[in-house]
Image (cartoon, rainbow, N blue to C red):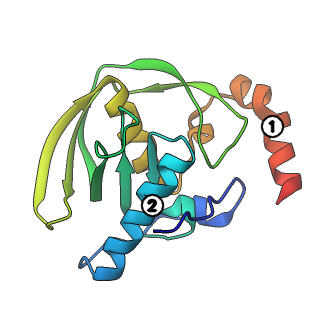
Amino acid sequence: MAILKVKTYPDEVLAKRSAEVELLRPEDLEFIKDLIETMFQSDGVGMAAPQVGVSKRIIVISPEAKKGKEKVYINPEILLQSGTQLKEEGCLSVPGVTAEVRRAKTVKIRARDLEWKETVFEAENLEARILQHEIDHLDGKLFIDRLGFNQRREILPGLKMLRSKS
């Protein structure tokens, strides 16, 4: 397994919609292992393929932040959202920047698993937040894209610093 380089704002791969996975290939399975290892090495609870420069609709999450408890979702989509929660969020691709983000409290998701079986499930609270955050990555959105004018103004110095490093 390899630790992959995490792409950071303003890398253009983070702003593009990722391609659907048509067929799960052996190299995809190896990539998923690397993505999981990278997530844990980076102390993350979720990671999307575009965050390491791969524009495919693959995410891994681990709300418990424990190896062996991670979940892999291929081509995930949000079917339903309900309720709201406002919590502090950060992102491995926007290091050093956090902000309160409003998200749905409960989501219903459809995705494929590692055996290519379609699954539909509900998640709530932290797991719902992680899923929404990672699916946003697949759609070319960062959590900072969900902020209002005043919030963006507050984080502007951190974004300028990231732009200057790129």
Secondary structure beneath dot 1 equals helix
Say what amino acid the circle numbered 2 marks. Answer: Leu
The tag earlier along the polypeptide, 1 or 2, is 2
Query: Which of these two is toward me, 162 or 18?
Result: 162
Q: In which image quadrant can residue 157 be found?
A: top right
Q: From where the camera sits, is residue 75 visible?
A: no
Say what amino acid the circle numbered 1 marks. Answer: Gly
Query: Which of these two is toward me, 35 or 83?
Result: 35
**In the picture provided, is 37 more to the left or to the right than 155?**
left
The residue sitting at 54% across, 49% down in the picture is 41
Crowd rating for badge 2 (residues with CA inside 10 Å; few <14, some 14–19, many 20+): many
The residue sitting at 44% across, 39% down in the picture is 45
Q: From where the camera sits, is residue 127 visible?
A: yes
Secondary structure beneath dot 2 equals helix
Q: Which residue is mark 1?
A: 158
Q: CA distance from mark 1 to mark 2?
A: 26 Å
Q: In which image quadrant can residue 96 be found?
A: top right
Q: Which residue is mark 2?
A: 35
The residue sitting at 37% across, 65% down in the picture is 32
Residue 87 in percent (x, y) is at: 50, 20
| Quadrant in which the N terminus is drawn | bottom left
Crowd rating for badge 1 (residues with CA inside 10 Å; few <14, some 14–19, many 20+): some
Residue 25 in percent (x, y) is at: 27, 81
Q: Vertical placement of 79 versus 97: above or below? A: below
**In the picture provided, is 152 more to the left or to the right than 93?**
right
